[in-house]
Amino acid sequence: PTPPGKRPESKARTPIRYGTLGSRDAARSPQTLVEVTSFAAINKFQPFNVAISSNVLLLLDFHSHLTRSEVVGYLGGRWDTNTQLLTVLRAFPCRSRLGDAEAAGAVEEEICQSLYLRGLSLVGWYHSHPFGPALPSLHDIDKQMDYQLKLQGSGNGFQPCLALICGPYYAGNPGVESRIAPFWVMPPPEQRPNDYGIPMDVEVAYIQDGFLTNDVLQEMTLLVEFYRGAPDLVKFQEQWSQDQTYLDKLKGSLASRTPKDQSFTHILEQIYGLLRHSS
Ligand SMILES: [Zn+2]
C-alpha cells in the first residue's frame, strides 16, 4: 500500500542506540527514542517468559487507533513463580485524558477493582505512539523502571512488569497492521549508576483466544463513547492511503488479532458502524 499522508503530529524523531547515550544528561530531551537491545546481544537469558492473549492486543490496538493523542492503559494477568511465566489476559484502557490527574486517579481505582473482581494481578501497562515508531522514549524507560520497582515491591521476590507500545499510524509500518512492541528495562550496571536504564526487547508468545468476550466488546463500546466528538478523534471516513480509509486501516490491523470463533464478526461490524457515525 501507499504510505499514509504525513500528519502535523508526526514528529521526525530518529531513534538512537543505547550505546551512544552515555550518562544521564538533563539537556537531552525526554522524548528521545531509544532502540531496544536483545538479551542475546548481551549474552543473557530473558529472566521470564511472556504469553499474551489476542484479545489483549485487539483491545489495545483498537484503543490506540481512536485518537491522534497518546493513550494509556494497564495489563492484567498472572505471574507463575514456578514456571516463570507471565500471562497477559486482559487490557484495561484508561478512559481519561493525559494530564487530567483527578480523572486518572478515579480511573485507576476503577481498574484496580476490576482486576480484583476478575482475580487478576496488575502485570504491566501500555501506551501509544500514534504517529511514531513503537520504541520507548527516555521518559518511557524511566516510567517503566518505576513500575518495575513498584510491582517488585514487598518481599515476595521477583515479579516482572511488562510494557507495550502500540504504533498504529507510523508511516514506517510495513502495512496496515500496527506495530505492538514489548519492552522491559534492565537497570544500568552498578558501577554506572548515572546511566539510563537499558530498554530490552522481550520475546513474547502470542495466544489466539477462543472467542471475543462480552467484557472486551463492552470496553470497545465505552471507548467509542468516551472519544465521541473529541477534537483529536480520528476521522474514520477520511483516506488513510490512496485506496483505504482510516476505518479500513483499523479493520485490517484488528483482523490479525481476532479470536478463533468468527461468530462475533457482526458485533464488531456494529462497533465499526458506531465509529463511522461518531467521527
Ligand atoms: Zn512513549
Image: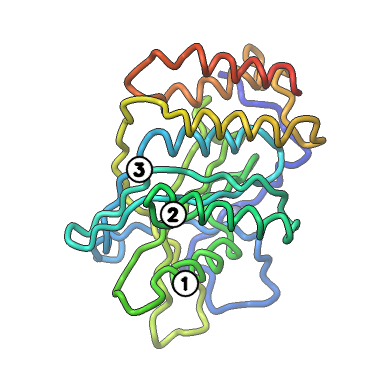
Q: Residue furthest front?
A: 117
Mark 1 = which residue? 150
In the rendering, at what x and y percent does residue 150 appear? 47, 72
Q: Nearer the viewer, residue 209 or 185?
A: 209
From this view, report whether residue 128 is shown above or below residue 230: below
Q: CA distance from mark 2 to mark 3?
A: 19 Å
Q: Residue furthest bottom?
A: 191
Mark 3 = which residue? 52
Q: Is residue 105 left or right of residue 43?
A: right
- Residue at (39, 56) in percent of width and height: 121
Q: Amino acid at mark 3?
A: Ile
Q: Nearer the viewer, residue 90 or 24?
A: 90
In the rendering, at what x and y percent does residue 258 appear? 41, 24
- Residue at (60, 38) in percent of width and height: 64
Q: Neighbour class for label 3 at 10 Å: few (<14), some, many (≥20)?
A: many
Mark 2 = which residue? 116
Disc 2 to disc 3: CB gap under 8 Å: no
Q: Which numbered disc, 2 or 1, marks the residue closer to the eye?
A: 2
In the rendering, at what x and y percent does residue 46 appear? 27, 60
Task: Tell which circle, 2 or 3, labels the residue nearer the N-terminal end.
Answer: 3
Task: Tell which circle, 2 or 1, labels the residue nearer the N-terminal end.
Answer: 2
Q: Residue furthest left?
A: 82
Q: Secondary structure at mark 2?
A: helix
Q: Is residue 239 left or right of residue 136?
A: right
Q: CA distance from mark 3 to mark 1?
A: 22 Å
- Residue at (47, 84) in percent of width and height: 193
- Where ligand 1 lies, by quadrant? bottom right
Quadrant position of the C terminus in the picture: top right
Quadrant position of the N terminus in the picture: top right
